[in-house]
Image (spheres, rainbow, N blue to C red):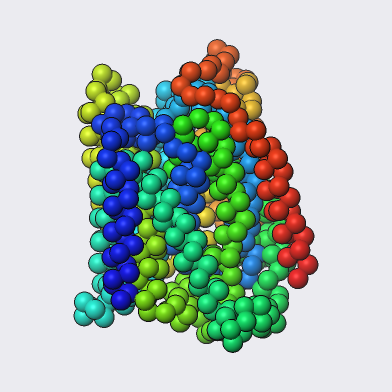
Amino acid sequence: MALFTFILFTGFVAFYATWKLRRDKLDTQDGYFLGGRSLTGIVIAGSLLLTNISTEHLVGLNGSAYRNGAIIIAWEVTSAIALVVAALYFAPRYLKMGLTTIPQFLEKRFDGLTRTLIAVLLIFSFVATLLPIVLYTGALNIEAIFEISDLLGVTQQEGIWVTILIVGSIGAVYAIFGGLKMVAYTDTINGFGLLVAGLLVPILALLSIGDGNLFEGFGKVFQNSPEKFNVVSKESGVGEGARTAILPFEVLFTGFMLNQIYFWCMHQSIIQRVLGAVNLKEAQKGLLFTGLLKILVPLVVVLPGLIGYYYFGESLYDNPDSVYPLLVKKVLPLWLTGFFVAVMMGAILSTFNSALNSAATLFSLGIYKRYINKNTSDGKLVAMGKWTSAVLAVFAIGIAPFVASAPEGLYQLLQQLNGIFFIPIASVIIAGFLFPKVSASGAKAGLLFGLVFYVVADYVVKVPLHFVHIWGIEFVLNIIVMHIVSALMKKDEKFVMTDAGVLDLKPWKYARHFSVVLIMCAIILYIVLGNV
């Protein structure tokens, strides 16, 4: 029955996406890389949710919540604020310029070399950090629920290898042959499937704990460890213990929001959906609907970890990333397991496909067309994108099994590695929008300084600061370096943002009202849960 429900849901998603794409032209640049600029708000929201929420969240965040409590909720709730910034400030400007990739803006604002450097860094960050961790956590979850190693008669490590290979290969096929629109349509169904399946886990667990009464079950979990529901950490981000702290509350006011704004406003795999919107109104709807979903997502990626502590106590403290798979096995009936694994597979494929599609877009348009074949046709550009996806998928599959040993958990590892790339890139993009005096030379100097500074500070000198504080310091120093170098070097021509005339730029009339509600929800949640 589990296998039947798995095949049924997976087959439905594949059939629906293929049917929706039957009349689309996927052999053009916009058709393949931007879904023909035809994505609506609901499709964008569903796709953004699933691109973001993958197994590194389900496994990693729940594992962290089990061990460290609800302080980890900050990664989700503050996303709503960043999405407001994306909807009201960045989306109108991106769509006005008619961009296909974020590095295109950097070429318009600075120069071609800045665009190329950022494109290369983004591609490397996808292959070296995001893709392998997504594949590994996905394989870990599927192995724990379906026990692939027992079915095949191999060791657990070999079972994870096999799962990584299969999932990675399927994901590559989706990304290679369907382009962004295939990814977006499959994401939409899987995204809402993930919400349903993800909510079923804590609901069924609480019903079981409360003998059929959901609220009584929640009460028991809360009374078992009320301190774990507090979202305000008492850890220190400075001095002794700062480097091993999970998420001191103070970091929310230094480098934390910089990371959130980079991810939701500038990260290619996220913004590519916005760039594929049919108009600004739908782009803003998609971003703000995603913000609402992110307020609710802790019920899926944090609450199960707290329930896991009720069931397992401290017995899994040395292996927190096994908590969520074990909880799923414990509470889900067998016939639902197949549906859950199908949605889980969709979550893995979504993030994997999105990153592959984005990396292919960056390479094809930013490197191949710019340096190798300037007069290439759309058909050849799409073919290059497919080959790029295939090669990067092979690399990611090869690296994935080696991310198993992360002492603070897989999600924490991902965030620390992201700091190497995200803050320097964010510094350059923010400078491009907000600081007109920063020149191309200054941007490149700031980018190089940021890359070196973070690695030296966090990995070589090992300063006694939480890594998010280092992000904040790095950002300020990057901006200072950019201004100093810009003042010393030759001045650039003043950048003027022009309307490319690609899309209707009329905003959604409820965008500002919706934004205020989202920000208030985030603040109220912290006020309520910060006093537990």
Along the line of sight, which residue is nearer the eye, 488 or 59?
Answer: 59
Tell me if I can see residue 261 in this picture.
Answer: yes
Kindly identify the residue that appears in the image at 53 percent across and 16 percent down: 498
Query: Which of the 4 image quadrants contains residue 345?
Result: bottom left
Which residue extends farthest top? 493
| Image: 396 above or below 442 | below
Q: Is residue 190 above or below residue 322?
A: above
Residue 83 vertical position relative to residue 464 in the rendered view, above or below:
above
* Residue in front for this viewpoint, 313 or 416: 313
Left-right relation of 351 to 246: left
Up-down relation of residue 308 to residue 191 (above or below): below
Left or right for 278, reference 371: right
Residue 387 x, y percent position in the rendering: 23, 40
Indicate the quadrant containing the C terminus: top left, top right, bottom left or bottom right.
bottom right
User: What is the x, y in percent for residue 16?
Assistant: 32, 50
Q: Give the image location of residue 97, x and y in percent.
A: 50, 23
Q: Residue at x 42, y 40 (%)?
A: 122
Quarter holding residue 123: top left
Residue 20 horizontal/vertical position (percent): 33, 43
| Residue depicted at x 48% and y 24% | 503
Dividing the picture into quarters, in which one does residue 21 lie?
A: top left
Number of numbered discs:
0
Q: Quadrant of the N terminus?
A: bottom left
Q: Is residue 463 visible?
A: no
Q: Residue at x 32, y 69 (%)?
A: 5
